[in-house]
Amino acid sequence: MTPLEAWISITKNLEGKTIELPTIPKIKKIPVWFSATTNGDIIIIDKATSHEPSSKLSTPRILNYNTFQKVFPLYLRREKGESVSSEVTAITVNQVYYFSLIKHFSFV
């Protein structure tokens, strides 16, 4: 699956609705829930309202394809057991949301 195919899969799954998802930590840490929706071009991340513990976002975060295409290959490496945290942190502080969306909706 290419980054574009994964992005399209994620945005199609979010189209017209808001979905709550947990983060997917690799260490023994409790997942944090967040909500995600899309306007078709970007993905909007906010606090969860129906699940606990919810992320502690003070304002919504915007995820875009330009960043997604850089994060996607790092997610694939992460799934193979590589440590990518320093690389992905250099790209975005929103990696937990990108990783969760990929895991739940891109079917890689």
Image: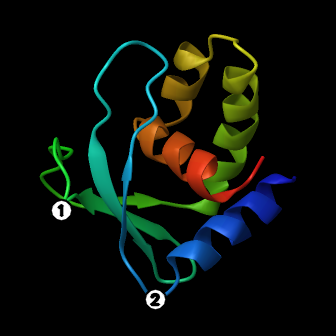
Q: Nearer the viewer, residue 17 or 91?
A: 17
| Badge 2 element | loop
**Residue at the image position 86 percent from the left and 53 percent from the top:** 2
Residue behind mark 2: 16
Q: Is residue 90 above or below residue 13?
A: above
- Asked whether the beta carbons under mark 2 and mark 1 sit within 8 Å of each other, the answer is no
Name the quadrant containing residue 79: top right
**Residue at the image position 56 percent from the left and 82 percent from the top:** 40
- Residue 68 in the figure: left or right of residue 64: right
- Residue 21 in the figure: left or right of residue 69: left
**Residue at the image position 43 percent from the left and 13 percent from the top:** 27
- Residue 86 in the figure: left or right of residue 5: left
Residue with the most extreme right position: 1
**Residue at the image position 20 percent from the left and 54 percent from the top:** 51
* Label 2 Cα neighbours within 10 Å, binned few <14 / some 14-19 / many ≥20: few
Q: Nearer the viewer, residue 73 or 101?
A: 101
Residue 44 x %, y %:
38, 67
Foreground: disc 2 or disc 1: 1
Q: CA distance from mark 2 to mark 1?
A: 18 Å
Q: Is residue 26 above or below residue 103?
A: above
Residue 5 x %, y %:
81, 64
| Badge 1 element | loop
Q: Nearer the viewer, residue 37 or 51?
A: 51
Residue behind mark 1: 50
- Residue 94 in the figure: left or right of residue 87: left
- Mark 1 belongs to which amino acid? Ser
| First along the sequence among labels 2 and 1 | 2
* Label 1 Cα neighbours within 10 Å, binned few <14 / some 14-19 / many ≥20: few
Number of callouts: 2
- Mark 2 belongs to which amino acid? Gly
Q: Is residue 60 above or below residue 85?
A: below
Residue 21 x %, y %:
39, 54
